[in-house]
Amino acid sequence: MIYLVRHGQTVFNRESRLQGRIDSPLTELGLAQAAQVGAWFAPRIDDPARWTVSASPLGRARKTAQIVALAAGLEGRVVPDERLIELSIGSWEGKTRPELETLRPDLAGQPFFMHCPDGETWRVASARIGAWLDDWADRNDQDVIAVSHAGAGKVLRALYLGLGIEAARQLETPQDAVYRLHGGRIERLECAPLPSAVRGV
């Protein structure tokens, strides 16, 4: 079975700055989100030997994966996989949403997903992420927790459901929930809410 997790909040996320392949460290909230996701998994791990934590090699995803694995009792089972890396968004990487809305006023209030003219294309992203999905979709001997990113996670879920780019643009990308992909369906599973002091409210 496949479980999909997005990395915890980063400094760039907090600044509404697009990351792509640029890395940014987890915030205190992001660290807490990763720990809560791991705590969600902990009572569901009956046999650690049949579980793998497959993670994007970018630092924010690796750190999230390590925290999830530790909290879930899967320490030492994190395996980096380049196919889960975030989409490249070319010249848009590092820019804030207001900056991009100035460049592209037609996208104000809309997802920036797959709109960058020099970013990774749907075809290229689908090929690499689809290859990962092919490796794991029908396995009965192993369960996998995929720790990835907003854009890559959208592509993965869209491919699993047979959706195209326009439907993928509308998919949510929470940092405090788990998606279970099983039997041709995707279910969003909520983790325990964090205290308001951690969430900054």
Image: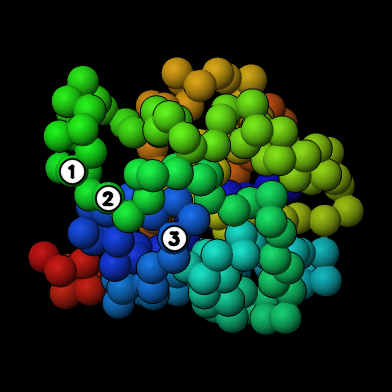
Q: Residues within 10 Å of mark 3 (few under 14, many from 20)?
A: some
Q: Are marks 1 and 3 in contact (CB under 8 Å)?
A: no
Disc 1 or 3, which lies upstream in sequence?
A: 3
Amino acid found under the numbered disc labelled 1: Glu
Q: State the CA–CA distance, disc 1 to disc 3.
A: 17 Å
> Residue 4: image x %, image y %?
58, 50
Q: Nearer the viewer, residue 187 or 120?
A: 120
Q: Nearer the viewer, residue 104 or 110?
A: 104
Q: Is residue 109 visible to the viewer in this orientation of the structure?
A: no
Amino acid found under the numbered disc labelled 2: Lys
Q: Which residue is mark 2?
A: 95
Disc 3 or 2, which lies upstream in sequence?
A: 3
Q: Which residue is mark 3?
A: 22
In the picture, which quadrant includes the C terminus? bottom left
What label sits on residue 99 in the rendered view? Answer: 1
Dot 2: what SS?
Answer: loop
- Residue located at (69% from left, 56% from top): 82
Residue that extends furthest to the left in the rendered view of this protein: 201
Residue 192 against residue 62 in the figure, above or below: above
Q: Are marks 1 and 2 in contact (CB under 8 Å)?
A: yes
Q: Quadrant of residue 116?
A: top left
